[in-house]
Image (cartoon, rainbow, N blue to C red):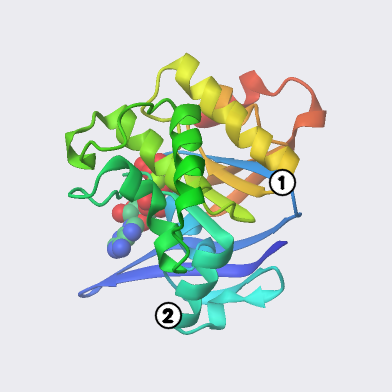
Amino acid sequence: MIQVKGLKKEFVQGQERTEVLKGVDLEVEEGEFVAIMGPSGSGKSTLLQLLGGLDLPSEGDILIRNSKISNMTEKERTIFRRKYIGFIFQNYQLLPTLTVEENIAFPLHADGSLKKEKSEQIINLMDTVGLEGLGKKRANLLSGGQQQRVAIARALVNHPSVLLADEPTGNLDRSRAEEILTLISKFNRENKQTIIMVTHDIFAAGFADRIILFKDGVIDQIISRKDGDYTNYVANFMA
Ligand SMILES: Nc1ncnc2c1ncn2[C@@H]1O[C@H](COP(=O)(O)OP(=O)(O)OP(=O)(O)O)[C@@H](O)[C@H]1O
Ligand SMILES: [Mg+2]
């Protein structure tokens, strides 16, 4: 489903070059739920942005559903992303002047298919993420946790085959986080959605089949759920 080969990314600012991804190789199967954990600044969000085709690698390739997105033009990447990828950003990136329901429906407008029957789907999704009754409220008037839930609903509305989530529950309390993670896992199991989720939270990572420990721009280790109790190990790694 997802193949990453020799992926490197450097940022150049004036005279300064920063190599953020230093050679990442990874394969994720269809329907797999993978968590990425690692220290702040290790390159997790950068990796996710490249996987979502929001930016291009300096070196290496990314294949999603056998399409090489690292070779596509910006326009091709945009079309591909709308069709196959749901993205939950670390800072939500809602459209502040649009309402909650307009934000959630946004990916549907893009393919011109906002129909009456869709509004029921949006109301159901709002209920599921805990935004009932807030559909007409402007996004910039919501709390951080509420905005995060709008971002989650927006990413799921298209039933994307790949969901990329950057700290999707970082701003939520434990019980709300558990609800959202259960929802994401349910999508994963029932629709064979492939999920890559960046998280600092070992509780959230526990929902994944594999945990990728990321450090200094490379994969340090991959832990499988089948490996037994990894909680202390991961806590030490993150410390
Ligand atoms: N557009 C950019 N231009 C220059 N440097 C960047 C850019 N984006 C990211 N970086 C740098 O790349 C490094 C990795 O950033 P990234 O956001 O991928 O880390 P992260 O692992 O997601 O961290 P966190 O856990 O804090 O979210 C940082 O040093 C950051 O300053
Ligand atoms: Mg990040």
Within 10 angstroms of label 1, few (less than 14), some, or many (20 or more) residues? few
Q: Please give left or right for residue 67 compared with residue 132 in the image.
A: right
- Image coordinates of residue 161 in percent, x first then y, are 64, 56
Question: Helix, strand or loop at disc 1?
Answer: helix
Disc 2 is placed on an element classified as helix
The residue indicated by pointer 2 is 74
Mark 1 C-beta to ligand 2 under 8 Å: no
Which quarter of the figure has residue 173? top left
Question: At x 40% / y 52%, what residue is drawn?
Answer: 105
Q: Nearer the viewer, residue 89 or 6?
A: 89
Tag 1 residue: 191
Name the kind of residue labelled 2 in the image. Glu
Q: Is 78 in front, or is 37?
A: 78
Q: Position of residue 169 (x, y in %)?
A: 45, 30
Q: Is residue 24 above or below residue 149?
A: below
**Residue drawn 80% across the image and 29% down it:** 227
197 with respect to 99 (left or right): right
State the quadrant of the N terminus.
bottom right
Query: Residue at image x 40%, y 63%?
Result: 109
Left or right relative to 6: residue 52:
left
Check disc 1 and give the amino acid type: Asn
Q: In the displayed structure, does residue 159 sit left or right of residue 192? A: left
Rendered image quadrant of residue 172: top left
The total of numbered circles placed on residues is: 2
Residue 27 spot, x, y in % from top left: 72, 58
Residue 236 in view here: no
Q: Residue furthest top?
A: 175
Question: Answer yes or no: do the residues labelled 1 and 2 have beta carbons within 8 Å?
Answer: no
